[in-house]
Amino acid sequence: MKIIDRYLVTQFIQTILFGLLVFTLIFVIIDMIENLDDFIDENVPNNIIIQYYIVFIPEIIRLMIPVAVLLASLFVAGKMSNLNELTAIRSAGVSLYRYMLPFIAVAFLISILSVYFGGYVVPMANKQKVFIEREYMNKGVVSSGSNIFFQDTKTRIVSISTYNVNTEQAYRVSIQDFDEDDITKMVMRYDAPRMRFDSSKQAWNLFNGTKRLFTDRKETIENYVLETIENLNFTPGEVIEKQRKTQELNLSELELYAENQLRSGNNPTRVLIEYHSRFAFAFASVITVLFGLPISANRRKGGLALQFGINLLITFVYLVFMQISKSFGKNGVLDPILTAWFANGVFLLAAIINLIRVRR
């Protein structure tokens, strides 16, 4: 590595770290002000508050990495341009492409690390963050799950009014089976005030309920004290899984969740979009550098402040564009992979065009 490369890499990384530190502090302060009433009302201990913000920091870092990388490249390139250091480098025969190489290499390395960081580290921290919100801040309480409604197979729907995590028991349960040839026609229905999982049989037991059979226009009702159903495709752990937010799931869990959704006859599009978006968002750093760096490397009227505003606007448009493409994908307009990478593809093409234009 040449001296100039080491200099650029050092300045670039230092500025990124400084940017992440500033953004993190700003986000923590804003969130602390927003949640101050909740902390006071719920008498949350100081050590829990500290723990809450420790596990909140990874999510902030994940979101701010592309912005910090862009602004760091902008600042370093803009500063060198204003001090005529960039002019001296290019006068020595270093092309714009060669000058950009250290920035792109660092951004690419950060993107690779961001895949693991955003795919595994952040969800692990989010699990703890959500746990603290539920246990200490009374937000989205699911210590006993409520109003759980899901499709177990293509022809079966399960409804659970409440679920107790500690006893692994479901209450006010309804299991509805439909005809394979006509899914609008119900063929059987179980109703029970209580349901519990039998680990020895790997089956669910329903207590003191009713079983209804529907044949043509006739309905048969059977009362039972105990009814064992062995072909339900979920376990106690999966009941809670179905309530978990995607932000709590790592890449492996998202992939498995999508497979379970497909197996049960549900549409896994939203889960697949989230899965592929983890990869796409991780590479946003490379896209923003490719787009913003050529602009920053050329001196123009308005100086660094104008370039800062332009690049910040570009980043904002990029993130908004990514969210819009997600909305189309969730509605089934775009393929999940195309949805996740659509914004990256469009802005990469625009970055290449801009790079060629600036090079001329």
Image (cartoon, rainbow, N blue to C red):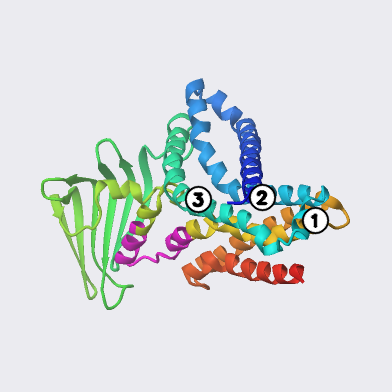
Q: Amino acid at mark 1?
A: Thr
Taking the spot 44% from the left edge, 44% from the top edge, the residue there is 121
Could you give the CA–CA distance between mark 2 and mark 1, rounded to whole angstroms?
13 Å
Quadrant location, the C terminus: bottom right
Taking the spot 47% from the left edge, 53% from the top edge, the residue there is 115
For residue 87, which numbered disc appears in the image? 1
Q: Quick check: 12 above or below 229?
A: above
Q: Amino acid at mark 2?
A: Ile
**SS label for mark 3:** helix
- Mark closer to the chain start, 3 or 2: 2
Identify which residue, 302 or 228, lies in the foreground. Answer: 302
Between tags 3 and 2, which lies in front?
2
**SS label for mark 2:** helix
Report the side of 240 relative to 280 (left or right). left
Inspect the magenta stretch and tell me whether residue 178 lies in it.
no
The residue that disc 3 covers is 114
**SS label for mark 1:** helix
Identify which residue, 278 or 174, lies in the foreground. Answer: 278
Q: Quick check: 90 above or below 354?
A: above
For residue 4, which numbered disc appears in the image? 2
